[in-house]
Structures are given as structure tokens and as C-alpha cells.
Image: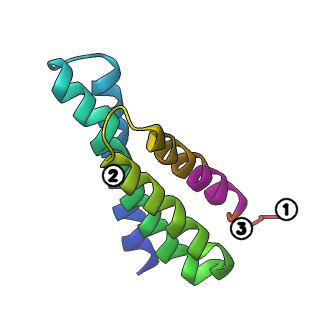
Amino acid sequence: MKNNLQATQGIISILAIICLAVGWFKIFPGDINYFLSGRLFYILIGISFIVQGRMLMLTNPKFVYPMYAAAGLCIIGAFLPVGSNLNVIKTIGLLGGVVISFVSRPQYRK
């Protein structure tokens, strides 16, 4: 089960990076670029954090709910209007999820 979750998370993460790159390089018209890099990217990252939270349930359960919270912030922030003052929550969710994923990794000793 863990290998399936890792593969799923990897595919979702790659799709998110592609969305971000397409938005940065402005390959499509402005609205589509914003949708890909400002909305779909955060939705995919949020889904990736949810999958990672399921993997954490198996290895380090104390980080599951913070990871779900980070995912929620990413996904909710992706649906906020462009000029909203709350748009920063998607960035907070992204940074929180990245920090949690690094902190929750198992420590390997030689």
C-alpha cells in the first residue's frame, strides 16, 4: 500500500511542478497561465499533501493532522478570489506542508 501511495504522490507532484512551470514560462494566454500556476498547482499540491498524510499515518502519525491542515490551506486558498487578502493562506499551506514533510522523514543512521 505504501508503494502505491508513494507512486501516486510522485505523479501528482510532477503534475503540480509542470503546472507551475507552464505558468511561469507563460506558454498559454494569461488566464490559463494563472489557472495552472495559481490555482491548479495549489490544488494538486494539496492533494499530494493528503496522500502524504496517509503515508505518515503508517510511519509517523503525529504529523498527519498538521499535514492535512497544510493541504486544506492550499486547496482552500486556490479557490479564493485573485485580489483577496486571504490568498496568503495557500502559500502558508505550501510552506507548512514542505516543512512537515522534511521534519517527518525518518532518520537513517549509518
Number of numbered discs present?
Answer: 3
What is the crowding at mark 1: few (fewer than 14 residues within 10 Å), some, or many (at least 20)? Answer: few
Of tags 3 and 1, the one toward the viewer is 3
Nearest the eye: 81 or 65: 81
Residue 78 vertical placement versus 18 (above, below):
below
The residue that mark 1 highlights is: 110
Q: Can residue 18 be seen in this view?
A: no
The residue that mark 3 highlights is: 106
Query: Could you tell me which residue is drawn at 25 percent across and 16 percent down?
Result: 26
- The location of residue 92, given as percent across then percent down, is 57, 47
The residue that mark 2 highlights is: 44
- The location of residue 44, given as percent across then percent down, is 33, 52
Q: How is the image coloured?
A: rainbow
Q: What residue type is labelled 3?
A: Pro
Q: Distance between the residues labelled 3 and 1?
A: 13 Å
Specify the principal SS of the magenta part: helix
Circles 3 and 1, Cβ within 8 Å, touching? The answer is no
* Magenta-colored span: 96-103
In the picture provided, is 30 more to the left or to the right than 6?
Answer: left
Q: Distance between the residues labelled 2 and 1?
A: 35 Å
Query: Could you tell me which residue is drawn at 66 percent across and 78 percent down?
Result: 60
Nearest the eye: 10 or 71: 71
Query: Could you tell me which residue is drawn at 37 percent across and 55 percent down?
Result: 75
